[in-house]
Amino acid sequence: IDPTLDLFAEINKLKKEKNAVVLAHYYQEGDIQDIADYIGDSLGLSQQAAKTDADVIVFAGVHFMAETAKILSPNKKVLLPDMKAGCSLADSCPPHLFRKFKENYPDHLVITYVNCTAELKAMSDIVCTSSNAVQIVESLPKDQKIIFGPDKNLGAWVAKKTGRDLVLWNGACMVHEIFSREKITKLKERHPNAKILAHPECEEVILQMADYIGSTTGILKYATNSPETEFIVATEAGIIHQMEKENPSKKFFPAPPNNTCACNDCPHMKRNTLEKLYLCMKNGTPEIDVPKHIIEKAVLPIERMLEISA
Ligand code: 13P
Ligand code: SF4
């Protein structure tokens, strides 16, 4: 790429030329969030993907999110700036193993967290995100037996909140499992008024310390509406970009990880860059393709989720 190119101007030009919409997750780098037409959590992004009238959806997020957009809008072109932008949580639940697991519980309903492959969604009864998981479980009869996967931390939190006994798949997100209780405690000692905000993908020891637990949109709203001025943020650090934009006078501290080599950036999310976003819009590739027979099955549990959370 010509280094003198104004990528913001070029991307805006391409959006018009191709009738493209750029959807970005809060974990994307700041520049990508700033050029996006819509920034949101997984639920908000799938709602946008379902209703957009653009011809091209450019998904600045990870593979399972772009797949969900394609399942909801199969006739549109869905682009992902870097096809290798995967997800450790989705990888922790290979479909062939989940199929076997499911066979052990024939009278259970399957709720899957949206952070999974299209193939897994096709084996599910209802999909959920972190912002509606509790609502979705509560929409089912109390005696309904449920398998919940792939995130064991979110699953355990939902089980606790709803008082239901969920059969959990043993999966987790590499980013949300690195936070250190001891280091967060020390940070809190230095900032005693700071509120701790955590994503439910965090381990229970971290969730126990939290003043608020919720999806990325929930965390952002809480910080914006709170009269407090300092926050310790236990989720991927990309969200802090919007938190600071909405609240320039407040202070946000990323929750420290347990190992000095680790950081709370998601390596998958951060594979996308402004340059790759520009190139994928210019070249119309890499494009997401989901087999028709998977789309036909996977769309049902996603639509069920959208209906329940409408
Ligand atoms: P939400 O944006 O739904 O809170 O999800 C967080 C996440 O881990 C996405 O990969
Ligand atoms: Fe997956 Fe975790 Fe990255 Fe979200 S933050 S995309 S769950 S690896």
Image: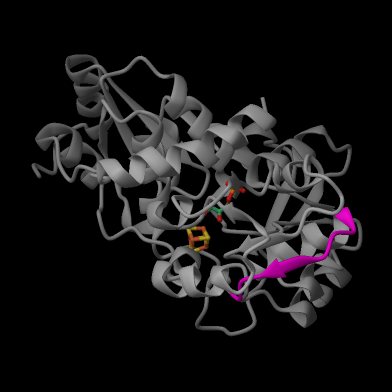
Q: Position of residue 79 (x, y in %)?
A: 25, 39
Quarter holding the C terminus is top right
The reply to whether the magenta stretch includes residue 242 is no
- Residue at (55, 66) in percent of width and height: 264
- In the rendered structure, the answer to whether residue 69 lies left or right of residue 4 reads right
- Is 177 drawn above or below residue 279 in the view shown? below
- Residue at (19, 19) in percent of width and height: 18
- Residue at (45, 19) in percent of width and height: 51
Q: Position of residue 81 (x, y in %)?
A: 26, 46
Region rendered in magenta: 162-170
Identify the image quadrant of residue 166. Answer: bottom right
- Is 69 drawn above or below residue 191 in the view shown? above
For residue 20, say whether it is visible.
yes
Q: Position of residue 187 (x, y in %)?
A: 79, 71
Identify the image quadrant of residue 283. Answer: top left
- Is 180 drawn above or below residue 161 in the view shown? below
Quarter holding the N terminus is top left
- Is 112 drawn above or below residue 258 in the view shown? above
Return the residue nearer the eye: 294 or 10.
294
Return the residue nearer the eye: 219 or 34.
219
- In the rendered structure, the answer to whether residue 28 lies left or right of residue 206 reads left
Total numbered circles: 0
Q: Position of residue 99 (x, y in %)?
A: 47, 68
Return the residue nearer the eye: 139 or 29.
139
